[in-house]
Amino acid sequence: MILIEFPPPDFKIVTEAGNQLIFDAYRKKYVVLTPEEWVRQNFLNFLSKTKNYPASLMGVEKEVFLGELKKRCDIIIYNREAKPWMIVECKEMDVPLNMNVLEQIVRYNMALPVSFLVITNGTNTFCCKLKGANDAPEFLQQLPDFE
């Protein structure tokens, strides 16, 4: 498990029609502030401010196709050649990071092969490095530096 120290949040949050909305700087719009969205925004903030991942190379809620099914990856980090490099799956804090979550992100990787898979619920975070197709994934003790 990787310990994450989130930077202090500086989010823009408004209330409209009884719903709290948070400004997503990556999608350039306000979105409903769900427990999962809170984790996603904090993790994006961490990647950008603490790990210095370029904000311009982060995609949020990007569509992937698994056969006929259309799904959305929470976060995709692209490398400098604009190729997917990391997929991050965010869950709300009370959702355990179990085999179901791991299987979900592995399915995304089948459609969008990357070097790193990350699952987080804001409290617990796991990252594995994917090598070759026949090699076992390597679980890391920290998130990789951006290449």
Image (cartoon, grey):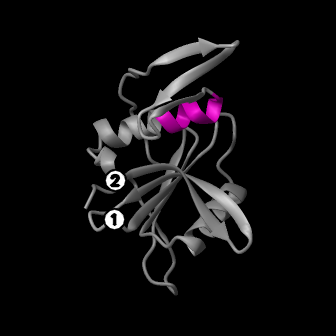
Q: Residue 79: horizontal and vertical position, in percent?
A: 31, 63
Which residue is rendered at x = 51% and y = 46% of the image? 125
Tell me the number on the disc at residue 82.
1
Q: Residues within 10 Å of mark 1 (few under 14, many from 20)?
A: few
- Amino acid at pointer 2: Leu
| 109 relative position to 55: left or right | right
In the image, is residue 36 part of the stretch drawn in magenta?
yes
- Magenta stretch bounds: 34-41
Furthest-bottom residue in view? 134
Compare marks 2 and 1 and give the one earlier in the sequence.
2
| 79 relative position to 133: left or right | left
Tell me the number on the disc at residue 92.
none
Q: Residues within 10 Å of mark 2 (few under 14, many from 20)?
A: some
Vertical comparison of 61 with 111: above or below:
above
117 or 12, which is in the foreground?
A: 12
Vertical comparison of 43 with 74: above or below:
above
Query: Do labels 2 and 1 touch, CB within 8 Å?
Result: yes
Which residue is rendered at x = 51% and y = 78% of the image? 136
In the image, is residue 35 part of the stretch drawn in magenta?
yes
Q: Quadrant of residue 100?
A: bottom right
Q: Quadrant of residue 105?
A: bottom right
Q: Residue 101: horizontal and vertical position, in percent?
A: 67, 55
Q: Secondary structure at mark 2?
A: helix
- Amino acid at pointer 1: Ala
Residue indicated by mark 2: 57
Vertical comparison of 27 with 137: above or below:
above
Q: Quadrant of residue 50?
A: top left
Which residue is rendered at x = 47% and y = 40% of the image? 27
